[in-house]
Amino acid sequence: MKDAWTPHHDGAVGDLWTGPAGAARLEVAEPVAVARALAWAAERALAVRVVRGVRPPAPRTLQIDVGALAGLVALDEISRVAHLRGGTTWAEAEALVASRGLTLGPVPGCVAETPIMASFAAGERRRPSPAFGHLTDGVLALRAALPKGLLTRSAVAPRRATGPDLARCVVGTGATLGLAVDVHLQVWDRPESRVAAAVRFPGWDAAHDGAVVALRQGLRPAWWCARRRGREVELLAELWGDAGDADAVGRFVDATGGREAPAADAQAWIDARADAADTRWSAQVAAPRGGLAAAARARRGIEAWDLRPAGATLYAPRSGDAADPPDAWAALADRLAEHLRGEDV
Amino acid sequence: MHDLTRLLEALAACVGADHVRTDAPDRDAYSRDLWPRSQLERLAGDPPTRPQAVVWPGRPAEVADVVRLCAAAGVPLVPFGAGSGVCGGARPDRGGVVLDVKRLKALRRVDEVAGEIEVEAGMMGELLERRLEHRGLTLGHFPSSIVCSTVGGWLAGRSAGQCSSRYGKIEDMVVDLEVVTGEGAIRRTPRADALGPGPDWNQLFVGSEGTLGVITAATLRVHPQPAERSFGGWLMPDYRAGLAVMRGSMQAGDRPAVLRLYDAVDTFMVGANPHAAEGGGALSRLKGLLSAGGDGGPSRLKQTVLRTVLGSPALTNAAVRALPARCLLITVCEGEADEVAGAHARLERLAAAAGGEHLGEGPGRTWLAHRHDVSFKQSKIYEAGCFVDTFEVATTWARLPALYEGVKRAVGPHVLVMAHFSHAYPGGCSIYFTFAGTGRDAAAMRHTYDAAWRAGLDTAQAHGAVIAHHHGAGLSRRAHMPAAHGEARQWFDALKATLDPAGIFNPGKLFAEEGA
Amino acid sequence: MLRLLDAHRHAIDTCVFCPKLCRFACPVAEAAARETVTPWGLMTRIDDVHVGRAPLDGAAGDLWAHCTGCHRCQAVCKHDNDVPQVLYAARAAAAAAGHAPAALGAWAHSAPPPRPAFDALPEGGPVRLVPGYVDDDTVRAAVRLLEAAGHGPLGRPVGGAGVSGIRLLEAGHPDAFDVAARRLADGVEGARLVVCLDPADALALRRDLPARGRTVGPPVQHLTEAVAGRLAALTPVLEGDVLYLDACRLGRGLGVYDAPRRTLEAVITGRVVEAVMHHAEGGCCGAGAGLAATQPALAAQVGREAVADVPDLPVVVASGVCAGHLRVATAGRAVHGWATLVARALGRPGQEDEG
């Protein structure tokens, strides 16, 4: 694949590679290099894609290879806060904190090899864990590179009231408003035990109700989903906790009010979710409570991952997703990026 | 120059003549919020900057009309809830029009099953919570200002309630927002639980303090009223031991509704340390002076004593250091029985391991019953010719002790200072500093007040803390905002240019305007 | 006349320096959605005028008319601050300076409506009726209730006065109130019991007049107190539930909450339903202290909001004045005066004598 790229040197960003149709590739090792790369791309009106390793060229796109911008900067074991470089993949990050007896929470296989920076840019939403939230939640601080070549700063704290949460500008916005060059993330003690639980219900609404009751009783699985199984709907969960808690599954089953099913069902699902090859999933639609059955009928193989009182987010195997149609907010986001680049709007 | 008369006529045409006011009492009342510095300015005789008019739109469409008219005229527009902010965020420092949102106060939708409500921005907090309680629900948001603040104000300032460790801050409760942006469009933000491409606009409007648009309504998560509640109280050997308990609970994944640790001075003031000698000299007198109650006001002698005590902050703070180090920790767990029992049992284990002396349920119950009473003490202090204020900062657990010690040291030469630790998270906690001082006259008080604030925020920033946890930035922290955000300011400027192209929304708040 | 405010200096400071802790409780501020008319806003303007920071002018006089005297603010104030009393002193200063709203003065000096039933009562007697400003239907109902409760014979206060003059005090005419209230006090001397149909009059005789140095000899009760537990034969006359609204001066003023509810339970087939906030925190109909005269639209809005929590039920309130105002304010909603409703439960007039 390296054959597709031609070495080049640029006064602003140093060594890089160029490819056909305005493609470019740059390896960065420092936050400031990301900032320079964004500015360079902005001047040339190139799209930006964050990658690890060498990927095929894409027209008018700058690939920023962040493989050298990876690693753990510091680990605050008192506060359970990991300071990670933006190029670190989730699998690497989990391994780094695991060696100190800590965890980021479950890491889905579909994102394990994605750099943290890219996940933030994509607005990663494929780990809606009741216990740990999304992978891009739990941010205590985020430093970003801006399209004008500058770096932001941020104090490290769990919450703040110093205006809008400006760091959100780099979550879900591609690289148009900046990229997260390093983040402070909440980490947790590794659980002493992980057990799988499976509960069956006569339909979607009953399964959803059972999940909500469990949440309201304070039970928060590390991850879970509801999916059809034959004529029933099963709720599958992984419960993290203390080694001495022998009745975790029983409490969960009792709370949901469903019928206990073989734990192997849940374990198989958990193994699949954690499998690095399992990269097929994409969020489909947020279904309101009561609308799960209809949404599930519309698409085979659907799983409801983000179960909450108001509804759930349904995920399905990816099938050449069409881009969401532009709406008023997308247009505003475009204008925001243009303003950030200093363009007349 | 805009033609004010024509603007006022147009405003009256759109919201009704009864809902546009230009009389002196209204312009005075809306010239400030509850930022204590405004009170000191008033006492010093400084004339406030008053708005040219106050308008009360009754529907979101009228808000949009008002925005369009002000944008066309280039007139500043300051959204206003109930004016309970303590940072000057709602002060119309550039004049213009104040837009009071309180006629927008409908509880549009209550969905018990989905656990959501849709409520308009002008709803008073206490009235909302009472209505939810009536239906077996709670928002779980109990700021000490709940009796005098609105939903819109909570959202604008990133408010936190006393039960935030269970229910989160207001930004954690938001599902979506209805906002009027600078071109006069009524927009509904994407739901936080169904985000597509693009930023989470909810989190960009929340905390914007009226600088990016007018929040007219919000969908918020609500919860069933807790079935069970447990109360705990411990006298910890020192504040570090108390912090260890709070940290252990939160990092274990529990979510107690209240974790509240008073430092030694605050513990003394709340009267919870049975080991503290009452013969605390100046401090005991101070405590007596500040005790709440419906008396006829402090006597001249008492006022003189209070001024004397607060007029020598170095001596008073030195006396404070002689107090026993023990600190009161109050906990409240709520929810379903199993969860409450588990979280409470863990707190008992953690507190015992950290050397806590168990005080039973009393302190927690007393706190819950009287949690808003402390605010009533404010009048007595001002009436005596003194001032009191608070500021809240936050950082990680590891940095918390140094931040606490550092701020106390920095502020101590100017004012009497005490603190409590509340709003705990797995990664850190906020510190709520209360300080009181005086001066020979209002101008001197203002000088001391400014010095205390500057010292506090400078020190917080030097320790890597955030300079506000839930009061917002407004004017009181504006000077420290550039250092807090660095180049992230560019995002704010771009947001401002995108959402408020005419630059009318609450100008000069959060960040000073260019050239100001 | 600003010196009238000197005595209230501590109360003023307490409010001005307070972070609006009664803000949610003020029904006028809530209906007006206006910070200027919150207890904090009103007291701040009083302070400004008192210390010379702002003029005593028509704007101040108009502003100070924005209170119903409901005392809901005081009910939640840990300082027990009596804002309406300070406001009445400020109204007096405005009136003396010629800056009080004309409508406020007219309201204070207006005559009660014609009440043939009251006029028909003999002067004097052991139980004397003070109708205040209630209408003739309410007087008739009260007479029947008191007789059924075994009170009597009924009579008018000597000299014919049927009002305490409390409106004069609330509108800022304390001296005129003194004269009127003392005349009424004189007119009830020697009675065994004084029964007021408007809680405001009972409050004037039990609290305001004694505070000005004149105690009233006989016990003074509101109608609901006088008949409590004494009405044996009540037949339900209303199907279903009702919303009961505490009249401010009966509840917060006189502390009478349960007696009217108990009686009410006996005259309906359903339950007495409470608003979200009730008893000491209950809402206000909006009519009090002249607001309905000076700001009729706002007063109506206050009334609508007081009963908005339970929109579908008939409303019962134990003050004829409140009931009359609510009927107008809520336009079409069933509003019952407690006295007339309970009197219907006695049966047809004269029926109790037939058995």
Image (cartoon, coloured by chain):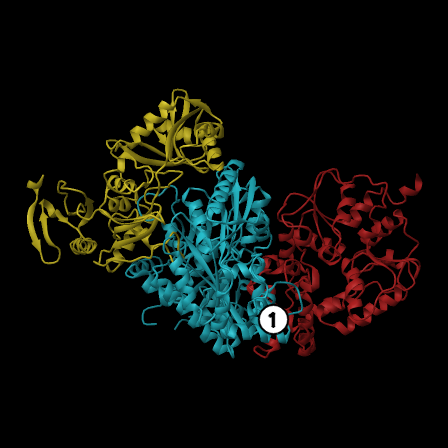
Q: Position of residue B98 (x, y in %)?
A: 47, 65
Query: Measured from the top left, where is residue B285 in percent x and y?
Result: 59, 69
- Location of the N terminus of chain B by quadrant is bottom left
When asked about the image quadrant of residue A307, the answer is top left
| Residue B219 appears in view | no
Question: In the image shown, does B45 or B382 lie closer to the viewer?
Answer: B382
Please tell me how crowded label 1 is: few (under 14), some (14-19), or many (20+) other residues with Cα within 10 Å.
Answer: some
Q: Position of residue B139 (x, y in %)?
A: 51, 47
Camera-side residue: B258 or C258? B258
Residue that mark 1 sits on = C13
SS for tag 1? helix
Chain coloured red in the rendered structure: C
- Vertical relation: C247 (above or below) A298: below
> Can residue B439 be seen?
yes
Name which residue type carries label 1: Asp
Horizontal arrangement in the rendering, residue C254 relative to residue A72 (left or right) = right
Where is residue B70? Give x, y as percent: 42, 64
Chain that is cyan in the image: B
Say which quarter of the image contains residue B392. bottom left
Q: Colour of chain A?
A: yellow
Q: Is residue C39 above or below residue C150?
A: below
Quick check: A104 left or right of B362? left
Mark 1 chain: C
